Amino acid sequence: MVVVSYFSRHDVVACLRSVPGASIQPPEVLVVNNAATDDLQGVLEPFPNTTLLEPGANLGYGGAINYAAERLGPSTEWILVTNPDVEYSEGSIDELLAVANADDRIGVVGPRITNDDGSIYPSARALPSLTVGAGHAVLHTVWPANPWSKRYLQADRSKTPGSLPLASGWLSGACLLVRRSAFEQIGGFDDRFFMYFEDVDLCERLGDAGWKVLYVPSASVHHAGGTSTRGHSAAMLRAHHRSAYLYLAKRYHQWYYFPVRAAIRVGLAVRTATSLRSS
């Protein structure tokens, strides 16, 4: 299990307290401290089988997961990727493992994620196509009811009735159980995504490599959401739009898509400026 912290000590403690009830055999835990000036050593002492990793710099979310994955014990078959503000419900880790171990071609599974108000977070969606992804990214702020946003948001599988696992295009990086061999096969997270879209990119590459991506609504976690980024809204907005562009530019990298990539870059810049002015 890998938890990434950025001035998130209280969330990390709450997360780790929830782990024993989520699994009969609690996992090895690595906590990556992305905030070099935040002393986490003392708050982690009550938690056995937990190791603090201090890279000395903010590696970003995916970069921190990669850093920790290289330091996991050789017997670790699954990597449980976890935001610090995630709390596990009773038996949720064991439920994820049960589904994941049922098929050797499963590369990653993700649970149902609930918000503070009890609503279900849209954690499982189809991969965004060029037109849908670009239309949603560029227009959602100024025209929320645009047809591309409607199509993208309707791709959410998280609210589908029933508890059977569902194939998905991508799963939220707030909580992912990734097969280590699959993770290593594709080179882990692309750490060019400092934050945002690293989960979309990871799941797409796993799918392209032949691995199954499954949403598991029978396992549930609670996600407070954004506790590490509160007070940094402008920086987070810019990071989100940079990652949105990187994802689409990476997916549609061919030379003949250059005009489209240029239009996306301009559109995202306009959206960033518009959002900052209205905030």
Image (spheres, rainbow, N blue to C red):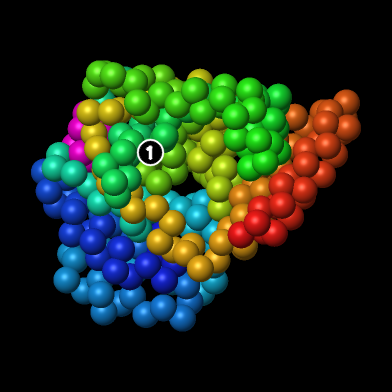
Residue at image mark 1: 121
Q: Amino acid at mark 1?
A: Tyr
- Whether residue 97 appears in magenta in the rendering, the answer is yes
Asked if one can make out residue 77 in the rendered structure from this viewpoint, the answer is: no
Instruction: From this view, report whether residue 105 is shown above or below residue 203.
Output: above
Give the x, y percent position of residue 114.
30, 41
Instruction: From this view, report whether residue 65 is shown above or below residue 95.
Output: below
How would you classify the magenta stretch by its main secondary structure? helix
- Whether residue 276 appears in magenta in the rendering, the answer is no
Residue in the picture at 49% in, 23% down = 154
Would you identify the image quadrant in which residue 94 lies?
top left
Give the x, y percent position of residue 172.
44, 39
Residue in the picture at 78% in, 38% down = 264
Residue in the picture at 48% in, 76% down = 36
Give the x, y percent position of residue 245.
71, 42
Give the x, y percent position of residue 262.
85, 39
Q: Look at the numbered disc 1 and give the secondary structure of its residue.
A: loop
Q: Nearer the viewer, residue 25 or 10?
A: 10
Looking at the rendered image, the quarter that the C terminus falls into is bottom right
Q: Start and end of the magenta stretch? A: 92-98
